[in-house]
């Protein structure tokens, strides 16, 4: 399990380094995930130890949201003051994301009707 965790963290670090060197506007962990995906495609399968480590991390994913929840509690007064604006922006950005996704899917789907 330790080797798999080191692999995941190493790929994240490699992604961060590549982002810093190339100045691409993508987060380093995303580049690390792409590298992991390419490595898994090249290998053709997921090693059982990597699968176990990944499932363990996913099973404890809720713990990673504790700092975000703490931040919300620390800024409760500000959320009360600016809550309406925050909710409006969240709703507008969600609608915009759904619309853009639908348009992209429509444009890229085979046999689309115009």
Image (tube, rainbow, N blue to C red):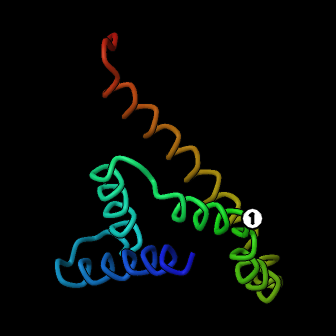
Based on the displayed image, in which of its 4 quarters is residue 86 positioned? bottom right
Q: Is residue 51 left or right of residue 7?
A: right
How packed mark 1 is, by other alpha carbons closer than 10 Å (few <14, some 14-19, many 20 or more), is few
Identify the image quadrant of the C terminus: top left
Residue that lies at the very extreme toward the left in this rendered image: 22
Question: Which residue occupies 71% across, 79% down?
Answer: 68
Q: 106 above or below 92?
A: above
Q: 50 above or below 28?
A: above
Q: How many marks?
A: 1
Q: Is residue 82 left or right of residue 107?
A: right
Callout 1: SS: helix
Q: Is residue 90 left or right of residue 29?
A: right
Residue that lies at the very extreme toward the front in this rendered image: 48
Counting from the top left corner in percent of width and height, residue 14 is at 30, 79
Based on the displayed image, in which of its 4 quarters is residue 81 positioned? bottom right
Counting from the top left corner in percent of width and height, residue 67 is at 72, 83
Counting from the top left corner in percent of width and height, residue 17 is at 27, 84
Q: 86 above or below 5?
A: above
Question: Which residue occupies 71% across, 60% down?
Answer: 87
Which is nearer the eye, 33 or 8? 8
Q: 91 above or below 52?
A: above
Q: Which residue is labeled 1 in the image?
A: 84
Question: Which residue occupies 42% across, 75% down?
Answer: 7
Which is nearer the eye, 98 or 61? 61
Identify the image quadrant of the N terminus: bottom right
Question: Which residue occupies 67% across, 66% down?
Answer: 56
Residue that lies at the very extreme toward the bottom in this rendered image: 74
């Amino acid at each position: 399990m330790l080797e798999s965790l080191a692999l995941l963290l190493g790929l994240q670090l490699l992604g961060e380094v590549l982002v810093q060197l190339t100045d691409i506007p993508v987060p380093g962990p995303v580049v690390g995930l792409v590298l992991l995906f390419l490595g898994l495609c090249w290998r053709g399968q997921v090693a059982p130890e990597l699968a176990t480590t990944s499932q363990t991390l996913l099973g404890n994913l809720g713990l990673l949201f504790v700092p975000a929840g703490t931040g919300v509690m620390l800024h409760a007064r500000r959320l009360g003051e600016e809550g309406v604006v925050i909710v409006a922006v969240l709703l507008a950005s969600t609608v915009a994301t759904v619309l853009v996704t639908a348009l992209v899917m429509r444009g890229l789907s085979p046999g689309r009707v115009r």
